[in-house]
Image (cartoon, helix red, strand yellow):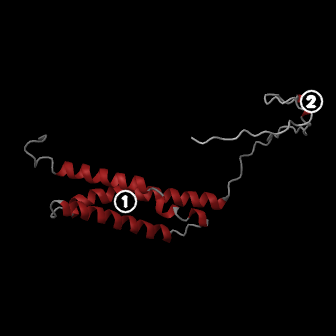
Amino acid sequence: MAKFKKKKSAPMPGSDGSKDKIADINDIPETEKSEPITNNSKDPPIINAATNEKNKKLSTLFWMRIGLGIIAGIATTFIFEDIEGEERRWASIVFMIIVFFASIIVAKKMNMQLPSSDRKKIVTQGIGSYVFLYLFAWIVSYTLTHLGDISTGINL
């Protein structure tokens, strides 16, 4: 265990050496007091037209990816019907990635005027929802189409 030397210095002039002394309120210099700013106008704040257009396009991209995730998930059930086992799973994942890259190309064609700090939004906008809805739609559609095939499962 290391030993630290205690710092020994002379007390400051005008101080009694107490560390717990609280500064007197009169020692604090006065600052300018400003009146609170109030907005008396009844007009709503003006929204920049370019920002509104950008948000509209990002919203369109988000909902496009939601729709693509559901449609591609359902289509996967029927497209890869002939493939069995592990290959079906990997083919579906590759198909999911291809459809997502196609949505990136479509997003770039939408000519969104994004600042350089927001360029990654073209890729990240709705990616989580896309993946989970794709998987959900694929699982549900596969389950519903193969419901009667399993003898030990629920039989309708």
Q: Which residue is mark 1?
A: 68
Reply above or below: 37 against 62.
above
Mark nearer the viewer, 1 or 2: 2
Q: Quadrant of the N terminus?
A: top right
Q: Is residue 114 in view from this perspective?
A: no
From the top left corner, tell me how far across and down residue 150 is, in percent: 10, 47
Please rate how many residues cluster around mark 2, counting C-alpha atoms within 10 Å: few if below 14, some from 14 to 19, many from 20. few
Depth check: give the residue in front, 1 or 89: 1
Which amino acid type corresponds to the residue marked 1 in the rendered image?
Answer: Leu
Please tell me in which quadrant of the rendered image residue 75 appears: bottom left
16 left or right of 136 in image: right
Determine whether, in the image, residue 75 is placed left or right of residue 4.
left
**Residue in the foreground of this view, choosing between 43 and 59:** 59
Residue 78 percent coordinates (x, y): 21, 60
Query: Which residue is nearer to you in this view: 87 or 107?
Result: 87
Rounded to the nearest whole Å, what is the CA distance between mark 1 and mark 2? 68 Å
Q: Residue at x 50, y 64 (%)?
A: 122
Give the structural element (helix, strand or loop) at label 2. helix
Dividing the image into 4 quarters, which one contains the C terminus? top left
Element type at marker 1?
helix
Tell whether 9 sits left or right of 72.
right
How many residues crowd mark 1 within 10 Å: few (<14), some (14–19), many (20+)? many
Q: Is residue 133 above or below residue 1?
A: below
Q: Where does label 2 land, which residue?
A: 26
| Image side of residue 147 versus residue 24, left or right | left
Residue type (three-letter) at the residue carrying disc 2: Asn
In this rendering, does residue 95 appear at all? yes
Image quadrant of residue 19?
top right
Labels 1 and 2: the sequence-earlier one: 2
Task: Give x and y (percent) for residue 155.
Answer: 11, 41
Across and down, in percent, residue 110 comes to 51, 68
Q: Which mark is residue 46?
A: none
